[in-house]
Amino acid sequence: MPDAMQPTWSANHKSLPARVETGVRHVDHEKIERAVRMILEAIGEDPDREGLRDTPARVANMYEEIFAGLHQDPAEVLSARFHVEHEEIVLVKDITFYSACEHHLLPFYGMAHVAYLPAHKTVTGLSKLARLVDVVARQPQIQERMTNTIADILETELQAYGVMVVVEAEHLCMTMRGIKKPGSKTVTIATRGQFSDPHRAQDVLRLLKA
Ligand SMILES: [Zn+2]
C-alpha cells in the first residue's frame, strides 16, 4: 500500500490552520517539516528528542504566518479610496514591521515611514499604509527591494504626485552572526515623483524629525 511510501513523521501531522477552511492552502507544511527535520539532523541534533519533536510542525506554521505576504496582493490593500479636500503631504511614521532577509532567512525588523502627496484629492485609509508595509514585509526580502516595492505600489495605485518611503531596520544576520554589530541600523529611502526633488524630500524629512 502507498502507506509504505509515507515517511512515518507525517502520521502525527498537526491539524491544518483555519485558512484551510476556505480551500486555499499556499504553504506545503509537509515539505517544510521534512526540511526542518533534515536541518536538525544535519547540525547534529536528534529530531526525535522530546523538545524537538514538534519543532518541524511549529516551524511550518510559523513560516505560513511570516511569509503570508507572498500570497496577498499588496495593491489590493489600497483599494479603499476617499475623496478629500486635501492635496498636502500625508505621512504615517513609525510603522513597526518584521521581515526575513532572503539571504539568511533571519529576521530584520524596525520602522517604516511612508509619505505621499495625494493627487486628484484622492487618499487611501491611513491604516492601509501600515497594512501595505506588512504585506510587503511578510515575504523573503531584502530591505532595499522592500522599500522600493512599497514606493512603487503607492505611486502606481494612488497615482500620487510624490511618494517617499524610509525604512530603518536591524538585521539579525548582521548582529547575531557575521560582523556582529549589535544595534546597527540600516536605512533605505525610496522617492518617486515630486519627492525625487531634494527640496521636496526635505519637507518629509523635516516632518519625520518633528
Ligand atoms: Zn541576511
Image (cartoon, rainbow, N blue to C red):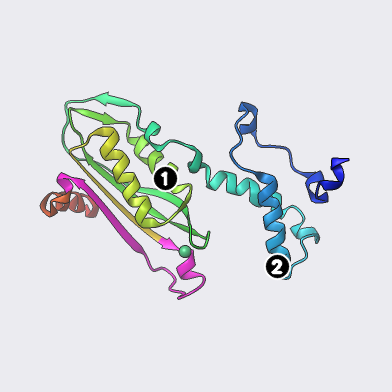
Q: Residue furthest front?
A: 1
Q: In the displayed structure, would residue 166 be above or below residue 19?
A: below
The residue sitting at 29% across, 39% down in the picture is 154
* Rendered image quadrant of residue 44: bottom right
Q: Residue furthest top?
A: 83
The residue that mark 1 highlights is: 136
Mark 1 vs mark 2: give the one in front.
2
Q: Residue furthest right?
A: 1
* Rendered image quadrant of residue 118: top left
Q: Are marks 1 and 2 in contact (CB under 8 Å)?
A: no
As drawn, the label of residue 42 is 2
The residue sitting at 40% across, 55% down in the picture is 110
Camera-nearest residue between 146 and 58: 146
The percent coordinates of residue 150 (x first, y second) are 33, 45
Looking at the rendering, the stretch of residues picked out in magenta corresponds to: 170-195
Q: Which of pointers 1 and 2 lies earlier in the amino acid sequence?
A: 2
| Kind of residue indicated by mark 1 | Val
Left or right relative to 102: residue 166: left
Camera-nearest residue between 94 and 140: 140
- The quadrant of the picture occupied by the N terminus is top right
